């Protein structure tokens, strides 16, 4: 799926994840026939499963992750863009959403589920930690004590120095990483990420702060947290119903009212 409407736009892997997630909606609303939607999804999954991966600069991805932008003509890395862990998570989530919907026993739908599972298991979250030892790293790197997930990197310069710290859209990435059956994130990664959260209090509401609204919404496209209300984050990491990660949205209402 193209990143924008320009004729020369590259493919965005995040947009592709969102697009894959839309196919079940299209089927349920009668906009696409189920078989047609399944074939479209399968075409995309086949490409990502069999596209070239490696440390070279002109491939599609590496270690189960993908470059942020891909050329529309051949699916290889566009320009000098980075291998993106969080955008890969959005792509993988779209694959899993499609796999959960296409649950019939037709050859196409069976292959969708098998391909999505294989692609998820291929993502090496331990490699993406940056501070966790791994074999055949293949990129210039350095040892760090922090075990928060890297933003990504490039073959030319190695890992990006920035890591996911503070509450952000990487919530989905952490869910996928902790649930991995092949390269799961260690428990200390969650604690390291959690320690960087910023708590604020406005209008009498204490909440987990991060300004852009999309950060609070994007991961929720694929994660259902309605059954987790009694396990909210707190400054100490213990259960505390008074500390509300969703409080940011509660603050928006009085803020808008005061400016109406």
Image: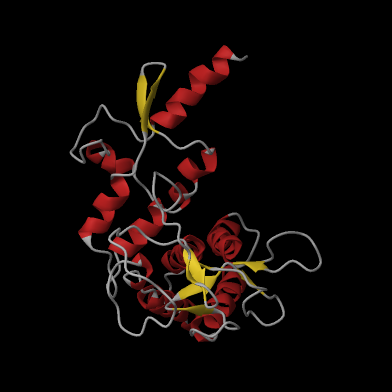
- Numbered disc total: 0
Q: Position of residue 201 (x, y in %)?
A: 37, 23
Please give the name of the residue rendered at 33% of the width and 64% of the height, measured from the top-left corner: 177
- Residue at 55 percent of width and 77 percent of height: 156
Residue 102 relative to residue 187: left or right: right
3 horizontally vs 191: left or right: right
User: Looking at this view, is 190 or 249 the one in front?
Assistant: 190
Picture quadrant of residue 75 = bottom right
- The foreground one among 111 and 163 is 163
- Quarter holding the N terminus is bottom right
Q: How is the rendered protein coloured? A: secondary structure
Say which quarter of the image contains residue 239: top left
Residue at the location (74% across, 66% down)?
Answer: 9
- As displayed, is residue 121 above or below residue 33? below
Q: Is residue 139 left or right of residue 256?
A: left
Image vertical order of residue 77 relative to residue 15, above or below: below
The residue that appears at 39% across and 29% down in the rendered structure is 247
Residue 80 on image: x %, y %: 63, 72
Residue 63 position in % (x across, y down): 42, 78
Name the spot of residue 89 as percent of width and height, x first.
45, 63
> Which residue in the rendered view is the most extreme toward the front?
142
């Amino acid at each position: 799926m193209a990143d924008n409407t320009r004729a020369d736009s590259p493919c965005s892997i995040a947009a592709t994840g969102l697009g894959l997630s839309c196919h079940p909606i299209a089927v349920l609303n009668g906009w696409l026939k189920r078989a047609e939607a399944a074939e479209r999804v399968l075409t995309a999954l086949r490409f990502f499963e069999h596209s070239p991966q490696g440390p070279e600069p002109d491939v599609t991805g590496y270690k189960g992750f993908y470059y942020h932008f891909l050329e529309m003509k051949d699916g290889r890395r566009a320009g000098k863009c980075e291998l993106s862990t969080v955008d890969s998570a959005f792509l993988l989530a779209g694959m899993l959403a499609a796999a959960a919907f296409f649950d019939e026993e037709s050859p196409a739908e069976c292959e969708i589920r098998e391909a999505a599972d294989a692609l998820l298991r291929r993502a090496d979250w331990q490699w993406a930690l940056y501070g966790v030892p791994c074999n055949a790293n293949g990129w210039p790197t350095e040892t760090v004590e922090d075990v928060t997930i890297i933003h990504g990197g490039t073959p030319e310069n190695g890992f990006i120095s920035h890591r996911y710290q503070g509450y952000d859209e990487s919530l989905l990435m952490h869910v996928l990483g902790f649930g991995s059956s092949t390269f799961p994130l260690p428990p200390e990664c969650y604690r390291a990420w959690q320690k960087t959260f910023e708590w604020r209090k406005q209008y009498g509401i204490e909440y987990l702060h991060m300004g852009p609204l999309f950060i609070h919404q994007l991961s929720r496209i694929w994660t259902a947290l309605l059954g987790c209300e009694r396990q909210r984050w707190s400054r100490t990491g213990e259960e505390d119903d008074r500390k509300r990660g969703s409080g940011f949205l509660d603050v928006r209402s009085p803020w808008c009212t005061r400016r109406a």
